[in-house]
């Protein structure tokens, strides 16, 4: 089992959910996050695309950093499903511009369904 974690633009969440559902991945967790990447939160084309994008400025030791709101999605899938999940996330989020996001793939050693006590791959089916 593998956990696929993706940080994506907020306005791409619905399309990403639909894409994952379309390949048979209905289980998904989403968290609203704020952060910055290599662009260091600097204004750019993002503001033209999403006018509500204001970022959050935080003063810490005299340095101002701008954080950009994003969505972080998580799903745990069987190993053989990872390539199609990653491809779907890329296809639904790739614009070719800075800030398209990141995908992380991490091993999951076990999963337990609380309701039934099933574990392993049975817990994620």
Image (cartoon, rainbow, N blue to C red):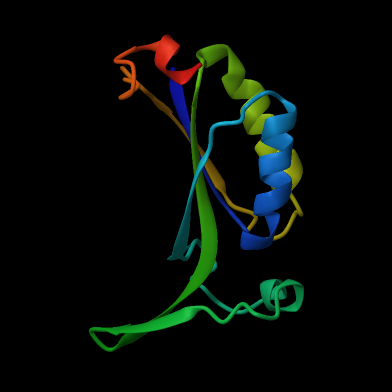
Residue 95: quarter of image: bottom right
Residue, far front: 115
Relative side of 20 to 28, left or right = right
Residue 44 in picture, x, y percent from top left: 67, 76
Residue 43 in picture, x, y percent from top left: 61, 79
Nearest the viewer among 62 and 35 is: 35
Identify which residue is drawn at 69% across, 51% down: 14
Which quadrant of the figure contains the N terminus?
A: top left
Reply above or below: 61 against 99: below
Nearest the viewer among 125 and 70 is: 125
Q: How many marks?
A: 0
Residue 64: quarter of image: bottom left
Residue 96 in picture, x, y percent from top left: 75, 54
Identify which residue is drawn at 40% across, 16% down: 123
Identify which residue is drawn at 47% across, 65% down: 36
Nearest the viewer among 98 and 85 is: 85
Relative side of 44 to 80, left or right = right
Residue, far left: 61
Identify which residue is drawn at 68% across, 72% down: 46
Reply above or below: 81 against 38: above
């Amino acid at each position: 089992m593998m956990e696929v974690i993706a940080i994506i633009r907020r306005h791409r969440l619905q399309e990403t959910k639909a894409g994952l559902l379309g390949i048979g991945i209905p289980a998904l967790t989403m968290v609203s996050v704020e952060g910055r990447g290599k662009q260091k939160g600097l204004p750019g084309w993002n503001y033209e695309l999403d006018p509500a994008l204001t970022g959050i400025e935080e003063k810490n030791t005299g340095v101002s950093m701008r954080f950009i709101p994003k969505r972080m999605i998580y799903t745990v899938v069987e190993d053989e499903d990872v390539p199609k999940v990653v491809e779907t996330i890329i296809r639904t989020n790739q614009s070719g511009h800075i800030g398209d996001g990141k995908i992380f793939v991490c091993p999951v050693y076990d999963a337990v369904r609380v309701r039934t006590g099933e574990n392993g791959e049975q817990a994620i089916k």
